[in-house]
Amino acid sequence: YVLANVANARNDQKGAVLHWGRVVQYAGTDTTYRDLKHNSQYYMGMTQLELAAAANGAVQQQLAKEAAATLKTVMEEQPENPDAANIMRARADALTFAKDT
């Protein structure tokens, strides 16, 4: 998580997504790491969306599909997230970029 935040602070969004993905992977279903996992999923999805918005063509579509999938998982695992409206809007944007509306 710390490595992801450092990468993000250094504008290395791809590195940040990689590290947040590892947090999600290693946290698994362990409830001890639930908050860390949820934060990582949220930041990963939003950063994937930023990367998609900056890309073009097939790369944009692939990144947007990944962002949409991550944000869908966030909503499934955190239905009462206080940022739910923002997450749903971001997912809609990702589906638009992915041309999957």
Image (spheres, rainbow, N blue to C red):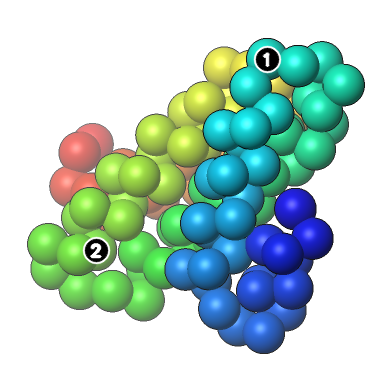
Comparing 28 with 57, the one in front is: 28
Task: List x then y, in percent, for residue 55.
Answer: 28, 74
Image location (x, y in percent) of residue 6: 74, 73
Is residue 93 visible to us here? yes
The reply, left or right, for residue 63 in relation to residue 1 is left
As shown in the figure, which amino acid type bears the numbered disc 1? Thr
For the image, the number of numbered tags is 2
Residue drawn 42% across the image and 47% down it: 67
Residue that appears at 32% across and 52% down: 64
Which quarter shows the C terminus?
A: top left
Residue occupying the far front of the picture: 26
Residue highlighted by disc 1: 29
Q: What residue is pinned by disc 2? A: 60
Q: Secondary structure at mark 1?
A: loop
| Gap in angstroms between the C-alphas marked 2 and 1 | 31 Å
Of badges 2 and 1, nearer the viewer stands: 1
Looking at the rendered structure, the secondary structure element under dot 2 is helix
Classed neighbour count for the residue bearing mark 2: other residues with Cα under 10 Å, few (<14), some (14–19), many (≥20): many
Q: Is residue 13 left or right of residue 10?
A: left
Is 8 rendered above or below residue 62?
A: below
Q: Measured from the top left, where is residue 86 in percent x and y?
A: 64, 44
Residue plotted at (54% across, 45% down): 21
Residue 87: image tag: none
Seen from the viewer's position, the closer of residues 80 and 58 is 58
Instruction: Indicate the quadrant where residue 19 lies.
Output: bottom right
- From what the image shows, is residue 5 above or below residue 18? below
State which tag comes first along the sequence, 2 or 1. Answer: 1
User: Mark 2 near mark 1, Cβ–Cβ under 8 Å?
Assistant: no
